[in-house]
Image (spheres, helix red, strand yellow):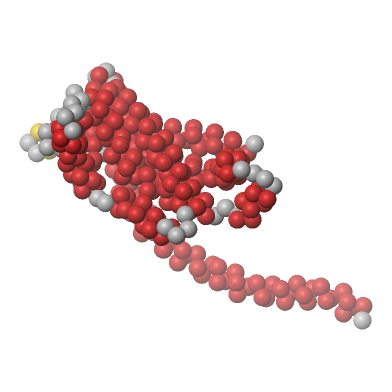
């Protein structure tokens, strides 16, 4: 009996090991398959992300010329970066982009939050409101540009026709510097606020209803409920929206280029348009690559700092 008692743990351990062996064999067999499954994605990333980025970095430190249909490369170090940032056009594009990003992120965040709160409290019109609000984000940027051009054009735009009919002074809209920047901010906010609305509305619906009901039972007013319950719960979604909108602002090109072509006098030229001008119009390949790389690195640093302080705030 004693030997049986002493051996029983060993027996149990042996049985357990026998049960685990098939699972271990299964895991070992699945490892090569997992590697093969990830291989296409790795190759895709190397072909369409790593290699182009390497080529941009190589161009950024080289004087690249096209002679007889061939590229000639000459290493120049940081000369391209110094040259591109010695020009006033580059700094103007950076300033325009910073203003554009700040205005569009703030306005779309406020409008998206307000719309999410209003739609969340709608009952009878909820399906209609959700479907109508999402439509601007579905429309192609070219169509959006054409539509707003027909509204804001100083000569043939519908807005000036209304002012003319009312015997009011016509406005330059996209023909004057300050109003042109305001116009492209308006178009971008109109186009992409539905995306912000979807982010925040989805996060709003994920808040525990019992938490909101408990706050109401405790006598919390609607403003207090939003400030102390809803907004803290929406912080992760708001942070995600800010990151996405910053990236979208850096990439913005279609609508602004089709509406104003960066004018007047560069007042609406963003970094994406400036890169296009350097690379395709002026064939300054090295300077365009250096400027592109600087924009990518600056964006990564800004987002990294934002996410760092965001994580610090969450840890408190």
Is residue 40 found left or right of 157 in the rendered image? right
> Where 267 sits versus 304, above or below?
above
Q: In this view, which residue lies farthest toward the bottom?
A: 1
Q: Is residue 241 visible?
A: no
Q: Nearer the viewer, residue 37 or 263?
A: 263
| Quarter location, residue 53 | top left
Horizontal side, residue 127 vs residue 214: left or right: left
In the picture, the quarter occupied by the C terminus is top right
User: Residue drawn 42% across and 58% down?
Assistant: 125
- Residue pushed farthest left? 68
Up the image or down, 157 lies above or below 38; here it is above
| Residue 199 picture location, percent across and down | 45, 49
The residue nearer to you, when weighing 52 against 313, is: 313
Q: Is residue 160 above or below residue 23?
A: above
Residue 281, picture quadrant: top left
Q: Nearer the viewer, residue 141 or 84?
A: 141
Q: Which quadrant of the structure image shows residue 264?
A: top left
In the foreground, 67 or 115: 115
Looking at the figure, which quarter contains the N terminus?
A: bottom right
Residue 12: percent from left, percent from top: 77, 75
- Examine the rendering and report whether any part of residue 104 can be seen: yes
Residue 206 image offset from top left, x and y in percent: 54, 55
């Amino acid at each position: 009996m004693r030997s049986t008692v002493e051996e029983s743990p060993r027996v149990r351990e042996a049985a357990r090991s026998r049960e685990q062996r098939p699972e271990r064999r299964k895991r070992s067999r699945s490892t090569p398959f997992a590697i093969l499954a990830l291989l296409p994605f790795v190759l895709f990333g190397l072909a369409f992300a790593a290699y182009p980025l390497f080529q941009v970095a190589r161009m950024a430190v080289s004087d690249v010329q096209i002679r007889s249909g061939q590229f000639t490369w000459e290493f120049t170090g940081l000369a391209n970066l110094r040259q591109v940032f010695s020009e006033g056009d580059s700094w103007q594009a950076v300033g325009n982009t910073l203003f554009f990003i700040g205005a569009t992120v703030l306005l779309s965040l406020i409008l998206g939050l307000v719309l999410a709160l209003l739609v969340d409290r709608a009952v009878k019109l909820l399906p209609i409101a959700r479907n109508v609000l999402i439509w601007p984000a579905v429309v192609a940027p070219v169509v959006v540009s054409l539509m707003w051009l027909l509204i804001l054009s100083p000569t043939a735009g519908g807005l000036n026709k209304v002012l003319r009919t009312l015997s009011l002074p016509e406005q330059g809209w996209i023909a004057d510097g300050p109003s042109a920047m305001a116009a492209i901010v308006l178009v971008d906010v109109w186009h992409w606020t539905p995306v912000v609305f979807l982010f925040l509305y989805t996060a709003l619906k994920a808040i525990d209803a019992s938490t909101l009901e408990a706050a109401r039972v405790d006598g919390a007013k609607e403003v207090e409920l939003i400030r102390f319950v809803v907004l803290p719960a929406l912080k992760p979604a708001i942070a995600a929206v800010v990151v996405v909108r910053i990236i979208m602002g850096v990439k913005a090109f279609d609508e602004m280029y089709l509406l104003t072509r960066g004018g007047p006098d560069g007042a609406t030229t963003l970094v994406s348009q400036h890169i296009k001008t350097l690379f395709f119009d002026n064939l300054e390949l090295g300077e365009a690559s250096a400027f592109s790389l600087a924009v990518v690195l600056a964006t990564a640093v800004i987002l990294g700092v934002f996410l760092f302080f965001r994580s610090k705030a969450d840890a408190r």
